[in-house]
Image (cartoon, grey):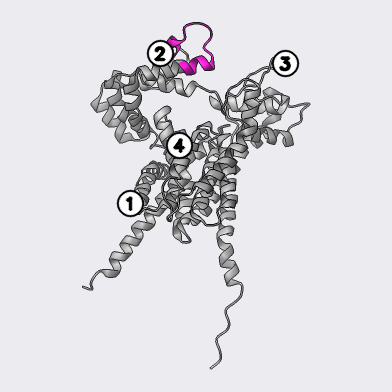
Amino acid sequence: MSEPAPPTRTRGPLRRAAPALFALLVFVSSGLAGERWISLAPETGGSLHNLSLTWNLWRWGVASTRRATPPELQPENRREPLYSMLLAGVLAVSADRETTTRACIFQREPACEDLVLRLKRTNAWILAATCAATFLAARAVLGPGLAAYVACLLFATTGSLWRVLDRAKSETLATLLVLLACWGLYAAASRARWRVPAIAGGVALGLLMLTKAVFFFAGPVLLAAALVPLKGRRPWKPVGVALAVAYLVTAPWLARNLHHDLGFGISRDREVLAIRAEHTTMSWREWSAAWLYFAGEGSGLARGLLERSFAPEDWARLMESNPDGYYLRAKKNRGAVAARVQDGPLTEDATYEAAKAVMLEHWPMQIAVTGPFAVRGIFVGQNLYRWPPAKRAARTLANLMVPALAIWIGVLALRADTARLWFVVLPVYSYAFHAGITQNIDRFTWPILPEAAVAFAALCALAAASVAGRTRVRPAA
């Protein structure tokens, strides 16, 4: 009998390289798919502010959202800078300073169509990187196996973030940075060799603060989480190093703001706080309707229950399109916040102080309305799919993401799995902050969807293991 042939030496290396090859495939395919969603659609809302900041950074080297030229154009910090800096970098390598005008970007002149599309494609490739990173992070947190592939598929196909590929919105960049920061914090807190992941996670967290200012205030939450024992120790050192690195990353921007008397912080856009303050003036009847109204933005069932249970006037002022609604009152400076400003123009600082005063005056409603706004953040299932069955399936899966994240956190807590809880500290903080301080529109939840996809995949793996276990012990018929 001849001896069996020895195993090939390529099997081991190929098996080890398979995850990286799959991640590369995900990156390329999702990037190319993302480019198909790009069009020359006009920008709206906050996208215009980001583009103005991009233009002023590239053309004049001044971080400002205002339409002016030096010396009238003065530094400000209304918006977080990093996303616009990235777009300004694209302009720096793609645009001709002599022939490219502001109208090129804002009015979509035919000669500048390629440049505009190049700016928009940046979002597609950032999202592609997030899809690939979701797979790699899921493998790191959940281990090798099918769960990581499920997490990647869930995030890539639910489609919520595909809606902003066509807009100069910073959610795509924030989503990638939240994921990298979570991955780094998890690795730093759970490994003996924590220095490299702590530094990497700190860099990602610092860049995240420069993309979404809400995370600038996450330091105390992370330090409090470090009080929870992990494998018999408290991860003070890795968390402290990560935070130190993060705030060092933001230091140049903070120093710049202090130098120009712009205050200590990343940005000073008080509009969101004013919108929340206006909502605290609602009646208790409107508050009761708000649960179904905000759920009804993503659920036909909730919308039907709202219309059967409440009169239209009970939720009319919750509509963002209503000129007398809470949203447009704040946007147009006509509501309770504006009435608090006694003299002078409605500046950012005056708006901030007035919004705080309104929220303090209506503090019971400020606390109570957190519930409806928390419900609002669950329904993230918006997508651009054209085939109705795919649209409904993706919408349903996306709307299960946040509940899956909450359930997984409960499972981890019951099992005292404090290591994996570090992967979701930032998403918990972000969701709680937006539910408690903002109007928590679905777009505010999108940056935590990769972690929610990992949670969903983990629950699927637990369910499959439970079914398989029961099948193995089932007695023969």
Going from N to C along the chain, the mark reached first, 1 or 3, is: 3
| Image coords of residue 309 (percent x, y) | 23, 27
Going from N to C along the chain, the mark reached first, 4 or 3, is: 3
Going from N to C along the chain, the mark reached first, 1 or 2, is: 2
Residue at 45% across / 20% down in the picture?
A: 274
Residue pointed to by mark 1: 414
| Image coords of residue 2 (percent x, y) | 56, 91
Residue pointed to by mark 2: 336
Going from N to C along the chain, the mark reached first, 4 or 2, is: 2
Q: CA distance from mark 4 to mark 3?
A: 38 Å
Whether residue 114 is visible, yes or no, is: yes
Q: CA distance from mark 1 to mark 2?
A: 44 Å
Report the mark closest to the observer, 1 or 4: 1
Left or right position of 348 against 277: right
Give residue 430's mark: 4
Give the residues in magenta: 335-353
Please identify the residue farthest to the right as the structure is shown: 98
**Label 3–label 2 contact, CB within 8 A:** no
> At label 4, which amino acid type do we have?
Ser
Residue 53 magenta: no
Residue pointed to by mark 3: 71
Q: Quadrant of the C terminus?
A: bottom left
Q: Is residue 79 above or below residue 176?
A: above
| Image coords of residue 215 (percent x, y) | 51, 35
Q: Secondary structure at mark 4?
A: helix
Q: CA distance from mark 3 to mark 2?
A: 36 Å
Going from N to C along the chain, the mark reached first, 1 or 4, is: 1
> At label 1, which amino acid type do we have?
Leu
Residue 344 magenta: yes
